[in-house]
Image: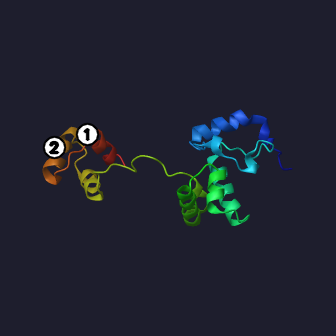
Amino acid sequence: MVPTVEIGASANGRRRALETAGLLHPRFGAVTAPLFDGREPFFLSLDKVQVKYEMLRAHIVDSVRVSSAASAHGYSRAAFYLAVANFEEKGMLGLLDERRGRRGPLKLTAELVAYLQGAESSRSGAELVEEIERVFGVHLHRRTIERARSR
């Protein structure tokens, strides 16, 4: 037996889940597409991924002009084209925003990691800070060194 889900039963719960996941549409109030008029609880203008998907579908399936589809879904033409490119490259995962911030330590190269992992385990991170700066000319924080050694 397939369980049934009442989509509209917990709109607040869905909103909290979207908020926690960072998936709230930044301009949900600007969404004017008929699907998101509130009559059908499945379509929620707060859901950034759903809105992007429906924006692309409106253009591709319903032949809505790019500028109209983007505007009706609370996005610019530039954002539309970014969504298309990401969708073509990654599928549904492309509709998720990229994670913000750095993708890891900037100064910690593969060469440095290998050097640190080969260092004597009795040496402290503080000792290695000075050595790394002297040998490689790079200043690393003691905790960065300790994390790299524990990988």
Q: Residue placed at 14% from the left, 52% from the top? A: 135
Q: Nearer the viewer, residue 67 or 125?
A: 67
Q: State if disc 2 and disc 1 touch (CB < 8 Å).
A: no
Residue 109: which quarter of the image? Answer: bottom left
* Disc number placed over residue 130 in the picture, else none: 2
Name the kind of residue labelled 1 in the image.
Arg
Q: Position of residue 106 (x, y in %)?
A: 31, 51
In the image, 1: left or right of 16? Answer: right
Q: Position of residue 63 (x, y in %)?
A: 71, 66
Foreground residue among 23 and 25: 25
Q: Position of residue 97 (x, y in %)?
A: 53, 51
Mark found first going from the N terminus, 1 or 2: 2
Crowding near the residue tagged with mark 2, few <14, some 14–19, many ≥20 C-alpha atoms within 10 Å: some
Residue farthest toward the top in the current orientation of the protein: 12
Q: In the drawing, what numbered circle is on residue 119?
A: none
Q: Amino acid at mark 2?
A: Glu
Q: Residue at x 40, y 51 (%)?
A: 103
Residue 28 sits in quarter: top right
Label 1 crowd (10 A; few <14 / some 14-19 / many >=20) = some
Secondary structure beneath dot 2 equals: helix
Above or below, 87 relative to 129? below
Local SS, label 1 = helix
| 87 vs 119, nearest the viewer | 87
Is residue 21 found left or right of 7 in the rendered image?
A: left
Q: What separation in Å lies between label 1 and label 2 (alpha carbons)?
A: 10 Å
Residue at 25% in and 45% down: 121
Task: Measuring from the top left, give residue 123's x and y in whole percent.
Answer: 21, 42
Give the residue number, with chain letter if any, for mark 1: 142
Query: How was this image coloured?
Result: rainbow
